[in-house]
Image (tube, grey):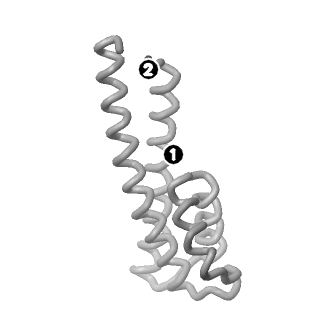
Amino acid sequence: MTTKEDLEKLEAELAEILTDIEEIDEIVSEYDEKETLNRKKAISKIHDVRFSNQAVFEVSADVLRYNSVPFCNVSNEALVNELRMQRDVLQIDYLKKKDDEVAMRGRTMLGI
């Protein structure tokens, strides 16, 4: 049976994903428009998302098995590409969790 707490937890996860996507979009947009990158902010965001989102963690872990370069040695373009990949994974994760939320709400309404 779906509980109110389960639904609230899922809603919080969805909100966190949207916040991460918005923050990534800000960093990437600044790079695309001005060709400048706040490396510290970009690296911090990459690190935070890798460890706060399971889907991103799994994709990153697969990539890091074959290619692991310290952030200080990575080009701005590579950092932005990592952020874009994370955004794509977050968007897919968001859609999956949104489907779960809709199903959960339906079960709640039906008392299942």
Where 14 falls versus 65 (above or below)? above
Q: Dot 2: what SS?
A: loop
Residue tagged 2: 2
Quadrant where the N terminus is found in the figure? top left
State the quadrant of the C terminus.
top left
The residue nearer to you, when weighing 20 against 112, is 112
Q: Which residue is drawn at 60% across and 61% down?
A: 50
Residue situated in front as seen by the camera: 92 or 34 = 92
Instruction: Tell me, for residue 28, which label it has, or none.
Output: none
Among the two numbered marks 2 and 1 on one chain, the one whose residue lies closer to the N terminus:
2
Q: How many marks?
A: 2
- Give the labeled residue for mark 1: 16
8 lies left or right of 68: left
Question: Is residue 84 left or right of 50 when viewed as pictured?
Answer: left
Type of amino acid at the residue the image marks with label 1: Glu
- Point out residue 111 in the picture as x, y percentages from the top left corner: 34, 11
Which of label 2 and label 1 is nearer to you? 2
The extreme top residue here reads 111
